[in-house]
Amino acid sequence: MIEKITTPVPYPEGTVNSYLLKDDALSIIDVGTKTSIALEAMEAGIKNAGYQMTDIEQVILTHHHPDHIGLIDAFPNAKVFGHVYIDAWLRRDPVFLNSHNDFYLERMKEEGVPEKYFGWVKKMTRSIEMLGERTLTDLIHEGDEIPGHPGLVAIETLGHAQSHFAFWNEKKRSIFGGDLLLDRIASNPLIEPPLNPKSKRAKSLLQYNNSLKKLLRLPIDVLYSGHGGDIHNVSELVNARLEKQHLRAMKVLSLLEGKPQNTFELTKIIFPTHYESQLGLTLSQTIGQIDYLLDCELIREETDSDGVFWYEKK
Ligand SMILES: [Zn+2]
């Protein structure tokens, strides 16, 4: 049995999907936002399916974003499964969390962002208030079969989040996709701090493209998505998303012809009307395209004496 439960989120997506799953175990995949209206909607959804919150045996998380993990406290009898990166968040690992401001400040400096915007560091650093109080009981790794759900296998699909898993059932040709692929909007490859503060930042867009390509290799008839409707044309949509991203990168490439630019200057050109109001998101997008162009060896990178990275077409 798969029962979709949709709860409201205080973001532009509007709602988030959870999936109640009954095999040998009764589990829920993702749990919505930590708000009272989301909790009400969740309780109504579980009741509608013929259960109570306390009946749920396992909470399985696709990634750590607050619209997916906020209500974990509402399932007191459930084990909680997720990526080791979620574990660091839920345990409020001090070394990990304390590194976040420094991480974003360093990124802004190397992106050439003027000092007057440095206050954005606080906005980029995700708050812990939207997290539940519980911690993970079990870590998930690539290829793990989820207990109580024969054939349901964890596929690590990083990019949108540094904690992202999709859960694929080969026999049923179905996958719970989290935010890997959404029907109406492209998923953002956000820049997030590494688990180990000494590690380099992950190249989210490259990770994300690789994760999308994993979908192309799996036989899938239906993808149960984290937001919006089910997706039946997975390959077609993946190819369209990859193609669109490539075209955007080619536009960015044309801006780097004959004149080196830094990430901030590029972001201003690409997003003239909303780079200031959505600095974190727009910088993330530009960094993604830069990483892609570097990976394709179409641009070169140089660092100036202030530590700012400059890019130019080869
Ligand atoms: Zn989401």
Image: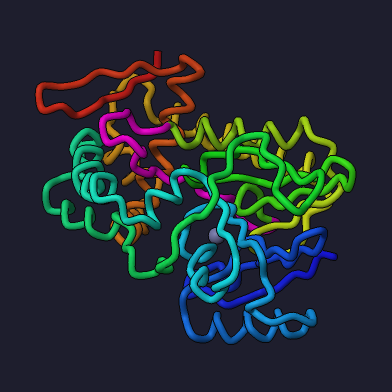
Residue 188: in magenta span: yes
- Residue 88: percent from the left, percent from the top? 38, 49
- Of residue 222 and residue 308, the one placed in the foreground of this image is 222
- Residue 252: percent from the left, percent from the top? 44, 33
Q: In this view, does 88 lie to the left or right of 68?
A: left
State the residue at coordinates (61%, 76%).
7
Q: Quadrant of residue 92?
A: bottom left
- Of residue 206 and residue 239, the one placed in the foreground of this image is 206
Location of ligand 1 given as a quarter of the image = bottom right
State the residue at coordinates (74%, 65%).
26
- Residue 74: percent from the left, percent from the top? 53, 76
- Of residue 133 and residue 292, the one placed in the foreground of this image is 133
- Residue 33: percent from the left, percent from the top? 50, 72
Image height of 165 relative to 110, above or below: below
Magenta residues (range):
183-202
State the residue at coordinates (34%, 42%).
193
Image height of 196 relative to 140, above or below: above
Q: Main secondary structure of the magenta part?
A: loop
Which quarter shows the C terminus? top left
Q: Can residue 243 be seen in this view?
A: no
Residue 46: in magenta span: no
Q: Quadrant of residue 310?
A: top left
Q: In this view, does 72 lie to the left or right of 168?
A: left
State the residue at coordinates (82%, 59%).
23
Q: Can residue 51 be seen in this view?
A: yes
